Amino acid sequence: MAALPSTRLDPAARRALLETAATAIEAGLGLTTAEPPTAAARSGVLGEPRASFVTLTIAAELRGCCGSIEPSRPLVLDVWHAAQASAFRDPRFPPLDATEWDSVGLEISVLTPCEPLRAGSEAELLRALVPGRDGLVLEWRGRRVTFLPKVWEQIDDPREFLHLLKRKAGWEAGFWAADLQVWRYETELIAAE
């Protein structure tokens, strides 16, 4: 499902989200005393329940990436919390420190709603998957894992994309279960320039 034009953010909203993410990280580093956005900052699209991820890089290498798959709070708050989680609570990395901050690349992915994909086999799923566009969520017995569409930039083969996503969940590359649940989504990417 392509993101409808109405789901695209205008330049002011994009800037506000980038500023929110940066301020959240600076607050976590103790560089500012800012608090999460107030109700006044949650107007319009920024106040709509949306899911997001914040990705941090240093020298083009991943430094943190956390977020939400399902919309549960206003977008601007979701970005605030995702930014702090990416900087300070991603279990793959130590917490970001102030000496790294000037080197950090910041990117926000705003997700479209997840769309269920009915696939009775891995082969069916691979036929339905659109490389370069689809983010993918797999869920089985309480374990849920996702790859953002941006991952296609490093993994352009659909089979490898799926196998690495399964490994991320702790499953074997050839794993398939009849009750495996699958969803896809797209993202609007917002990057600091």
Image (cartoon, rainbow, N blue to C red):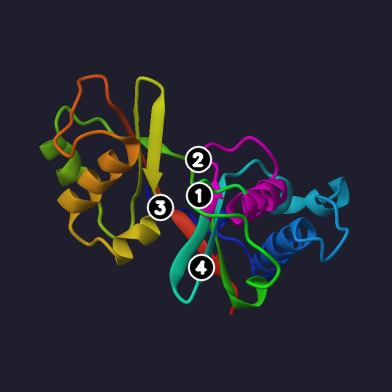
**In this rendering, is residue 191 above or below 6?**
below
- Which numbered circle lies on residue 148? 3
Identify the residue at horizontal 29%, vertical 44% (top origin): 165
Q: Depth-wise, is mark 1 or mark 2 nearer the camera?
A: 2
Rendered image: mark on residue 69: 2
**Can you identify the residue that label 1 sits on?**
111
Q: CA distance from mark 2 to mark 4?
A: 21 Å
Q: In the image, which residues are magenta?
A: 65-88
For the residues marked 1 and 2, what is the alpha-carbon distance in whole angstroms? 7 Å
The disc, 4 or 3, on the residue closer to the chain's N-terminal end is: 4
Q: Quadrant of residue 183?
A: top left
Marked residue nearer the N-terminal end (1 or 4): 4
Magenta run includes residue 159: no
Q: Earlier in the sequence, mark 2 or mark 4?
A: 4
The amino acid type of the residue labelled 4 equals: Thr
Q: In the rendered structure, which amino acid carries the disc numbered 3?
A: Leu
On screen, residue 166 versus residue 83, left or right, reads: left
The residue closer to the viewer here, 180 or 105, is 105
Quadrant of the drawing holding the C terminus: bottom right
Q: Which residue is mark 4?
A: 57
Category of crowding for the residue at label 4, using alpha-carbon neighbours closer than 10 angstroms: few (below 14), some (14–19), many (at least 20): some
Which secondary structure, mark 1?
strand
Q: Is residue 87 magenta?
A: yes
User: Where in the figure is residue 30, as x and y percent of width and height?
Assistant: 81, 61
Separation (CA) of disc 4 from disc 3: 15 Å
**Disc 3 versus disc 1: nearer the observer:** 3
Which element type, helix, strand or loop, lies under badge 3?
loop
